[in-house]
Amino acid sequence: MASESWKGELEMDSAKSIKTVTTDVLCIGGGGAGVMAAIAARKTGARVILASKGKIGNSGDTIMIGGSYSMDGESARKDYGLKKADPSFTKAFLFEQIVKQSFYLSEQPLVRQFVEESPPLVYACHEWGERAKQKQAFTAPAGWMLSGHSLGVALKQGLAETPGIETIEDFMVVDLVKDGGRIAGAVGFDVYTGESVLISAKAVVIGSGGYQPFSVSSTNSDVTTGDGIAMAYRAGAQLGDMEFMLFIPTALEPESSKGSILPYLLYAIGLPLGTLDEEGESIEIPRALRKIAKGSELGKVIWNYYWSASGGLYMDCSKLASMPRFVFNLGFKAMLNYFKQFYKYGHYHSDDLFEFKKIVLEKKKLEFALCSEYSMGGIVIDDKMATRVPGLFAAGEATSGLFGACRVADATTEMMVQGNRAGISAAQYASNVSSPTPDESRIRATIDKMNAPLAREKGTNVLAVMQRIHKATDRGFGPCRDEAGLSSALGEIETIKKDELPCLAAKCKSRAYNYERLCALQTENLLTCTEAGLRAALARRESRGFHVRSDCPQVDNDRWAVRILEEEGARGMSLTEKRPEVVSIEIPAGKEASIADYIVKEII
């Protein structure tokens, strides 16, 4: 831990004592959303603690990205003098694209907030990166490509330039605590020492990312278990859009690159690549949609629609391999020179590009799968990033409502914009309320939960349960769904929740860096998020964005142009529906025969 300001101990009884610290605003998450919230709250005048399950700026999904952050081209050219920016890419155009490509499920006040507030924040982060001497390559219409490591360094530069923020690393927040109906802080433990800690806070910002329940995911670490989403749910917040997971082409071979998004990048840059099913038959995409897919974020939803029904997928590299060798080598060298701006020469992250070249030339095909990169679902917020629980705010991938059924704008920009607004809102809220008194019974219950895997002499193997979750979601909650598969997966999740979760036990009983204990606590969170996703996917009897139902192929705006919200009820998870709020673009009526027909009508 980096914290030095512990204020004493709150004695629960002789067996349970907990170290406490007090602040105005607690920000949870060491990536862009948490860091931006901490900086904004501190600049607003609040006392701030930033807590991260790993190393700030160098853990979780932040270091896994290989992408960009951006603003509208009009602001980039006019306000920041970026001559290469495209001024025709206006705020109005960006707003329209997000709304339409969300399949009209985006909350338009959130889209407006994103569009209006992104330029100064994106530019500020770029400047942090420049001062930290990180490589950033400008891309049209108005953004910068960079590695996850470089983004993390830029964020840490921003922290360094904002004195007074207390940071706690390697700290797992387990549950939120309340004072009556309002938030009063959180309880967690130091991963390395096992020490229990209460952070008493007037306001909490959750910026801890999304959830990934699958055996293989893209650009996600194995700690992406929806911790913040599930904590907010248990504290009384609503969840929304949990059925929508963003799937992209992801490597399955070589084994060392399993989970890499290099196949997506190769398709995205427009190389002459085909796609084969498991029988070796070509999967064709209509020309008009291929044109949209090339170089566009919308390409992800197009590929998902056409490829998701195949049991096996192969990138057809035969045209590449049959090129004159000098032409192939020139193209390969250009790719090496591009990636060396951000990674070790010959690599993309840890992927050996020369190994990919060998597979292309020898096998002429590369096995891949559609794997989840990002979860559109999360905590329900308003345009101030406030939840319905007083004092609880959220930002970034942990939230829902901005991107609806399909994320087309940069997730890195989302976490900057929403993190900043959440920090400001949390600080303003904290300045107007008295110090809370955390519910002592809730603190006791959380300590009991944290210690339960250590106390059980016999029980269920934690890692085996996690594998069961993965198998269930791989079969029933993947890129192509139907009622039978979803129902089977939900039944398995319910069984695990009822029979296995209460019995999770760690073989090692030490509190000091106990990986099984950490996984046991993450399992509850992942089960909550996965159950919410499956229930919403079963309820949504249509196809929309990344929710492809083979048994319900229509896009049905008459019935399903609504968000599915979930909350904890007396009898378990309760579902309601909400029509997205409109600012300027009306939600169309009618039905389209398929997702492809919708894209042709609404996007082209």
Image: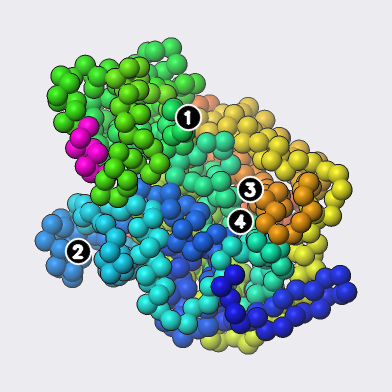
Q: The residue under label 2 is which amino acid type?
A: Ala
Q: Which residue is mark 4?
A: 227
* Distance of label 4 from label 2 (alpha carbons): 36 Å
Residue 555 visible in image? no
- Name the residue type under label 4: Asp
> Could you tell me the amino acid type at mark 1?
Glu
Q: Single out the residue that lies furthest toward the left.
A: 83
* Residue numbers of the magenta segment: 332-339
Instruction: Give the class, few, some or many, for how many residues have Cα within 10 Å of label 1's Cα (few <14, many ≥20).
Output: few
**Mark 3 residue element:** helix
Q: Within 10 Å of the Cα at label 2, are there few (<14), some (14-19), or many (20+) other Cα atoms?
A: many
Q: Name the residue tied to disc 1.
A: 255
Where does residue 110 sit, x and y in percent of width and height? 41, 62
Q: Main secondary structure of the magenta part?
A: helix
Q: Confirm whether the magenta stretch covers residue 595.
A: no
- Tell me the CA gap for discs 4 and 3: 7 Å
Name the front one of labels 1 and 2: 1
Which numbered dot is residue 526? 3
Mark 3 and mark 2 in contact? Answer it, CB < 8 Å.
Answer: no
Task: Look at the image and say whether residue 335 sits in the magenta stretch.
Answer: yes
> Sequence order check: which comes first, mark 1 or mark 4?
4
